Structures are given as structure tokens and as C-alpha cells.
Image: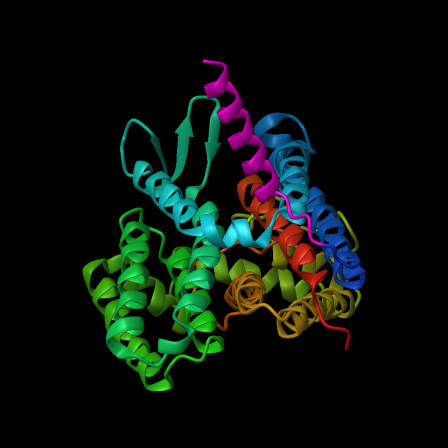
Amino acid sequence: MPRNKISIKKRITRFIKNFFSNEERRYPDMVFAGVAGLLLIIGLIILASASSVVGLKDFNDSYFFLKQQLLQGVLLGAVGGLIAFNISITWLKKWSFRMFLASLVLLILVLVPQFGDARLGASRWLNLGPLSFQPSEVVKFTFILYLAAWLNKQSELIKSFKQTFLPFVIVLAVVGLLLILQPDMGTMGIFVFIALTMYFVAGGNLAHLALLGMGGIGAVWMLIKAAPYRAARLTTFLNPELDPQGLGYHINQAFLAIGSGGILGRGLGYSRQKFQYLPEVYGDSIFAVMAEEFGFIMTVVVLFSFIYFFLRGFSIAKRVPDFYSSLVVTGLMSWWAWQTMINIGAMVGLLPLTGVPWPFVSYGSTALAINLTGLGLVLNISRFRKRS
């Protein structure tokens, strides 16, 4: 009996030692950390203003959404980021597949009525007792970890159609199918862009990527034909003036908010569109509220701050010697970059409305907690970067 206790104790000790890295490392990229912190603060300020009217109306508290974001997003994200900052990259690579499978189970549970929470015709939330969160945000993170480990393992066969490209497409199709069943086309698009970016950086065959792109276009066309509301959205995107009080209402109100900001903006807290005119002011449409209050000049400053954040992150990915770590950072940065471009592109009329939130800015405690965990991991990996 004592031997069993000692054995279990040794196993636990070994697990903890493997979980946390004991390697000697330098300081993380403090410039990247500083820019990320600045963007988080800006996001919280914008959220506090954009959500104030809805918070007061629905919860009798102007700062309801800000408080939720701080308690459930920032606080949990800080814990997750601290763990990710100290975790062993070797352990992460070893356990990435199991983490990915576990997150897929959560994504499947969303489709089970006893666990899934259907809102506005879509089942994207999972209720497990007191816990309520979006599994798709967790899957984004674990998918990047797993795909990086798998591409790293397949590096010598990366050009192979049968041994690399087909398994890559199958994994992507499984995730895509689960998201289509919710349905969540916007998130599915993010997964595809992340996967294509990582596959390309890993040295994948461009002909294979072109084939996948054509297949993706065909799949999107079939999905549009299968659901008339998607075709209506596309038609409204091309001609928003056709239905200004219906499907075109959202984008027209976004245009009005952005245009009303002018050069200098109305001032922080003085948006008019957030007074029940613009839908989803604290989520998908938060960029429009920011542009109205900040104006053109400050909006450009914020956007360039995000661009610098992305470039700095990709620079870290380029300078770390470990290929797995490089792919992880590439995946995380491409996730945030693509999602930012899609969100803002929809608000300025360059892309159809997809319901994709703006990372670090839009309301969403699950998304923010996972994003901050990802930031902790990037800072962890940045400690191994080569000096420029």
C-alpha cells in the first residue's frame, strides 16, 4: 500500500515537472506585451461606452457588460495567460491532440438539447451546470496547438497529397461540419483561414491550397443554395439600399455611425447610434461605435496599433528556432488578424455580415479569456526568440 502511494506521488510530481518548463529562458518580448496591454485597455474603454445604453436598459446597470468582461474574461484570462506563460512547450506539443479531441467533444455537446443553449436560431453556447461558454473559442485554441504539432511532425512529407493534404482536409472538414450544424458560418470561415495560413507557412503545396480554395467556394455556394437567408444576406451585401429597413438595416446603420464620426469624432460616450439604432453595439458592431466616437484620426491610430501588434507577433514566429513554436505563434496571430479584418471589413461594407466579433474589443468573456491565454503562450514562446 505505501508503495502505491509513493508511486502515485512520483507520478504527480513528474507530471507537474513536465507541465512547467525548467529550461533557462530570457525575458519575453516586452514591446509585444505592452502593445497587447494597450489594445486590451482600449477595448475595455470602447466596450464600456458602446454597451452602456443596452446595459442600463436590460440590466439597470450601464457598466454591466464591462463588469462581466472584467470578471469572466480578464480575470479568467489572466489565470490562463499565467499558466500558458509558464507551461512547457514540449508538454504542450505532446498533449495537443488530446486537448483538441476533448474540445471537439464540447463542440458536439452544443448540439445536444440538454447541454446546448440555442440563441437566435443557433446553438453556440454550452451549459454545464454553473458554467456557460462557447466551445468554438476553445476549439480555435486547441486546433492551432494540434495543427502545429501535426504539421511539425509531417514537415518532411508536407508536399504529399495522400499523407498530408488529405488528412489535413479531413480534420478541417470534421470541425467545419460541427460548426455548420450549429450553424456558425463566420467561425467556420475563421478556422479555414487559420488552417490555410498555417499550412502555407509550413511549406504546403500551393496547388493543393488552390484545390482546397476552389472546393471551399463550391461548398459555400451549396450552403447558400441550401439556406435562402444566406443568399438574401449576400444580395443585401451587394446592394444594401434594396432593403434598408430589413436585411440592409444593420449595415446601413453602421455606415451612418462611421460617417457621423467625421475627422475628430463625437467624443467618447457620445455615440447616437448606440441608442437602440445600431444592432449588436457591444459585439459585432463595436467598430462602428468606436469610429463614431473616436473619429477618423483616432480610429486610424487604433487600427495601426493592431497592425503593429500583428506584425510584432509574426516577427516572433519568424525568430523562434523551434518549428512547432513558430507554427503555434503563426496560428494565434493569424487567428486574431483574420478575425479583425473580417469584423471591420463587414462594418465598412467590404465583406458580408458574418457575426464575427473583434478580438480584444467585442464583448465575449469566453473569447477574451482564451485570447489572453493565447497571449500568455506567445509571450512564453517569445523568450526563446533569436536576437534580431
Q: Does 250 appear above or below 106?
A: below
What range is drawn magenta here? 1-23
In this view, the residue in front, 178 or 86, is: 86
Name the side, left or right, on which 94 lies relative to 212. Answer: right
Q: Is residue 120 visible?
A: no
Task: Say left or right for 227 vs 150.
Answer: left
Furthest toward the top, the residue is 1
Which residue does the image show at 28% across and 66% down from the upper left?
A: 167
**Residue 242 picture location, percent across and down:** 38, 67
Q: Quadrant of the N terminus?
A: top left
- Which secondary structure class fits the magenta region best? helix
Q: Tell which of 100 and 236 is nearer to you.
A: 100
Closer-to-camera residue (125/176)? 176
Q: Position of residue 19 (x, y in %)?
A: 58, 42
Image quadrant in which you'd find residue 143: bottom left
x 26%, y 75%: residue: 215
For the residue pair 213 and 318, the one nearer the viewer reads as: 318
Residue 105 in the magenta stretch? The answer is: no
